[in-house]
Image (spheres, helix red, strand yellow):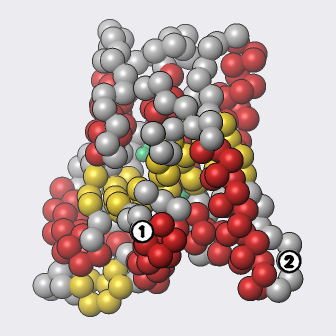
């Protein structure tokens, strides 16, 4: 089986790339895949810190937590821009080649801003997952929409970049990038905004050729386990840390739906629900 590369990308900061990467990786690990993780946002290092925390927590508690092979790549120190760009592309290539020897799937987290390292990462994607907040401010980072007709007036710089990387990918190995956009931190109320976003995203998805996947709601469980390096997919193993509520079960379903949309079959068996609800 050849290695599948999943890239998390969006030039907008704070949309949930690292959080989604973490949940995808743990979901895949628990499904039994050998997973590699590459952090191209080494300066912030959220994904790396998440797994450092996970390793430390497993050591401290003796828990048998599945771990990915995880590495990060720093920005090139070469002064010449052209050489630095090539150096970064080569580093991504080398690391992908290296990890591919041991892993079925590689998940790459990228920074919330444009740089050559992020571009290089995007060009290796088989699947590109773009989380976005459920807001027209975030949507504008994908394309400019006419407020009356929802017609797409212009592509954004990020969408242009994705199309450039689709071309790079096709030239390199004839492969294509399956682009999946997911809405993150969805509010459970605010239905008018949701409906307007639905219509606008529908128009954008046709023009930009991405698929829409069901996203994650705004839930504390998506962020509260960071310091332990855990996700709600680990909670069954770690009953003492978190008691499962209805909200957790709903969150678990959201993660499963995303993995399913990415082509991963059922990930974890349904957990038992705490009586507290
Ligand atoms: N579904 C969610 N529910 C609650 N909090 C969330 C959710 N998704 C992300 N967060 C929180 O939102 C913040 C931004 O998430 P995250 O760091 O994953 O975004 P990012 O896109 O990787 O950011 P950056 O561009 O800075 O790398 C974090 O505090 C994270 O814990
Ligand atoms: Mg991040």
Location of the N terminus (image quadrant): top left
Q: Is residue 269 left or right of residue 69?
A: left
Residue under the image location 50 percent in, 45 percent down: 3
Marks 2/1 in contact by CB < 8 Å: the verdict is no
Q: Is residue 195 left or right of residue 97?
A: left
Q: Check the image and name the residue furthest to the left.
A: 149
First of labels 2, 1 by sequence position: 2
Q: Which residue is mark 2?
A: 78
Mark 1 surroundings within 10 Å by alpha-carbon count, few (fewer than 14), some (14 through 19), many (20 or more)? few
Find numbered disc 2 in the image and state the secondary structure of the residue it sits on: loop
Residue 140 horizontal/vertical position (percent): 37, 78
Q: Is residue 275 above or below residue 44?
A: above
Location of residue 196 by image quarter: bottom left
Q: Is residue 158 visible?
A: no
Residue 97 horizontal/vertical position (percent): 64, 52
Residue 106 horizontal/vertical position (percent): 55, 46
Q: Which residue is mark 1?
A: 174
Q: Is residue 224 above or below residue 123?
A: above
Residue under the image location 48 percent in, 60 percent down: 125
Q: Is residue 258 left or right of residue 23?
A: left
Residue under the image location 67 percent in, 69 percent down: 89
Query: Who is closer to the viewer here, 36 or 185?
Result: 36
Q: CA distance from mark 2 to mark 1?
A: 30 Å
Query: Who is closer to the viewer here, 238 or 196?
Result: 238
Please name which of the two marks, 2 or 1, marks the residue nearer to the observer: 1
């Amino acid at each position: 089986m050849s290695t599948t590369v999943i890239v998390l990308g969006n030039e907008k900061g704070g949309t949930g790339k690292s959080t989604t990467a973490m949940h995808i990786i743990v979901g895949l690990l628990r499904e039994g895949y050998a997973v590699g993780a590459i952090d191209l946002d080494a300066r912030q290092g959220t994904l790396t810190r998440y797994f450092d925390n996970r390793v430390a927590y497993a050591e401290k508690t003796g828990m048998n937590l599945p771990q990915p092979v995880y590495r990060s790549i720093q920005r090139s120190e070469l002064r010449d821009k052209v050489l630095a760009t090539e150096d970064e592309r080569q580093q991504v290539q080398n690391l992908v080649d290296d990890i591919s020897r041991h892993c079925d799937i590689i998940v790459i987290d990228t920074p919330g801003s444009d740089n050559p390292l992020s571009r290089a990462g995007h060009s290796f994607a088989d699947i590109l997952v773009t989380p976005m907040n459920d807001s027209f401010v975030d949507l504008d980072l994908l394309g400019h929409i006419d407020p009356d007709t929802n017609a797409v007036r212009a592509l954004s710089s990020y969408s242009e970049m994705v199309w450039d990387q689709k071309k790079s990918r096709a030239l390199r190995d004839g492969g294509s990038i399956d682009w999946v956009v997911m809405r993150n931190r969805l509010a459970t109320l605010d239905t008018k905004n949701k409906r307007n976003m639905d219509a606008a995203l529908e128009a954008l998805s046709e023009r930009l050729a991405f698929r829409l996947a069901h996203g994650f709601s705004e839930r504390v469980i998506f962020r509260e386990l960071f310091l332990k390096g855990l996700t709600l997919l680990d909670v069954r193993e770690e009953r003492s840390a978190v008691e499962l509520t209805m909200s957790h079960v709903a969150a678990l379903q959201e993660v499963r739906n995303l993995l399913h949309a990415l082509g991963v079959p059922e990930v974890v068996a349904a957990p038992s629900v705490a009586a507290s609800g």
